[in-house]
Image (spheres, rainbow, N blue to C red):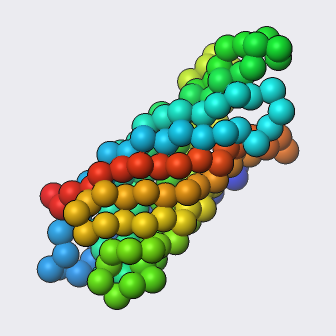
Amino acid sequence: MKKYTKIVAVAAAALAIFFTTNVNAQSAPKFGIGLNVGVPTQTGYSFAIGGDIRYQFDIDKQLSVPLTTGYTNISIKDTYGGGSFGYIPVKAGLKYFFNETGAGVYGLGEVGAAFGTNSGSGTSFVYSPVVGYAWSSGLDLGVKYEGLTKSGANNGYVGLRLAYGFKL
């Protein structure tokens, strides 16, 4: 694992520990399941699809800390040799609701590590800014960019995340 990936992993763990010790006792953590689809930003790739699970705990009604993992597969166009590559992202972040109710429009930023599932693909730094809308019923729709960086090379996709979340 590269040095910057270790730093990100330690920072994410420290952030999670810090916020879990300060979580509002009246707020139940949330669990979400999502589907991600998108268009890669690099030439030679055709589409991205994946699924994720998210554990989220609230600091207050407007600020939450999500911990997300899942699987994403990005397909390579046939004219570039075909096939695909997959990765397992492990991310931590901050989610801010612009409405005081804890629903509605939000902004989210996550960082972490992406573990490649293809032989020899290694680990990348992953980051994901999102703008979305969460309904009080648990439905969540977000527009996101998920970027991967490794040894100066960048890849990623612009996509949609459709999810359903519920309190534990």
Question: x, y percentage for residue 74?
Answer: 63, 29
The reply, left or right, for residue 42 in relation to residue 94 is right
Which image quarter: residue 152? top right
In the image, 116 versus 50, the foreground residue is 50
Which image quarter: residue 109? bottom right
Question: x, y percentage for residue 15?
Answer: 46, 68
Count of residue discs = 0
Question: x, y percentage for residue 52?
Answer: 41, 42
In the image, 48 versus 53, the foreground residue is 48
Whether residue 50 is visible, yes or no, is: yes
The reply, left or right, for residue 135 in relation to residue 77 is left
**Which residue lies most toward the bottom here?**
100
Residue in the picture at 18% in, 61% down: 167
Quarter of the rendering occupied by the N terminus: top right
Quarter of the rendering occupied by the C terminus: bottom left
Which image quarter: residue 29? bottom left
Q: Check the image and report above or below for 69 versus 79.
A: below
Residue in the picture at 70% in, 38% down: 40
Residue in the picture at 45% in, 74% down: 105
The reply, left or right, for residue 12 in relation to residue 147 is left
In the image, 130 versus 68, the foreground residue is 130
Q: Check the image and report above or below for 166 versus 63.
A: above
In the image, 82 versus 124, the foreground residue is 82
Question: x, y percentage for residue 165?
Answer: 27, 55
Residue in the picture at 54% in, 66% down: 131
Whether residue 124 is visible, yes or no, is: no
